[in-house]
Image (tube, helix red, strand yellow):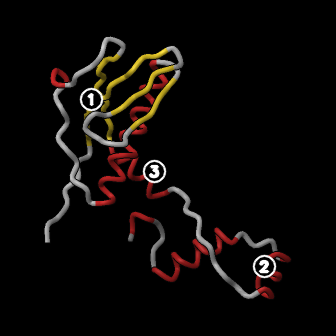
Amino acid sequence: MSIKITKDRYVFPAVFDYADDGISVEFPDLSGALTSGNSDEEALYMAKDCLALHLYGMEEDGDDIPEPTRVPDVAVEPNQTVVLIDVWMPPFRDKMADRAVKKTLTIPKWLDDLAAEHKVNYSHVLQDALKTYLGVTDRNKC
């Protein structure tokens, strides 16, 4: 069994394509990693978010992350430019681990009626119950 090693910092070239209606961004090394923005600042922000999300998904799926192409080797057209995008993954991974996920559950109607009378916050009660059941207090103590 091989152990998947992930890096904390990635730097990939992105192609910023300038058009009258905005800036589209693609990562030549990462198929499907596409975004856009209306200004350079917005395109840069969106590119960083896109890269982090795409790489996070690849890490979670156990996919091999390719080596980035060197900037001089990226072919561009006259309305395009290459921008290096740098992402630091630890805070992004933390953000993704702490994001809310929706779960569907089934309980008896009489229990739901009683909970409604007492204005029960199902999310809070379920989180507390799961932490107690699993013997943890927060994510870092799993």
| Amino acid at dot 2 | Ala
Q: Residues within 10 Å of mark 1 (few under 14, many from 20)?
A: many
Name the residue that disc number 2 marks.
115
Task: Say which of 117 and 84 sits in front.
Answer: 84
Q: Is 91 left or right of 86, judged from the image as shown? A: right
Nearer the observer, 129 or 76: 76
The answer to whether 105 is drawn above or below residue 48 in the figure is: below
Which residue sits at x=37%, y=42%? 32
Q: Are marks 2 and 3 in contact (CB under 8 Å)?
A: no
Residue holding disc 1: 13
Q: Give the position of the C terminus as an image quadrant.
A: bottom left
Q: Considering the image in quadrants, where does the N terminus appear?
A: bottom left
Q: Which circle's residue, 2 or 3, is located before the other in the chain?
A: 3
Q: Name the residue nearer the viewer: 102 or 69.
A: 69
* Foreground label between 1 and 3: 1
What residue is rendered at 48% in x and 70% in y?
137
Residue 61 relative to residue 7: left or right: right
Total tally of numbered discs in the picture? 3
Dot 3 falls on a residue whose secondary structure is helix
User: Mark on residue 95?
Assistant: 3
Q: Position of residue 86 (x, y in %)?
A: 30, 33
Rendered residue at 59%/65% (across/down): 102
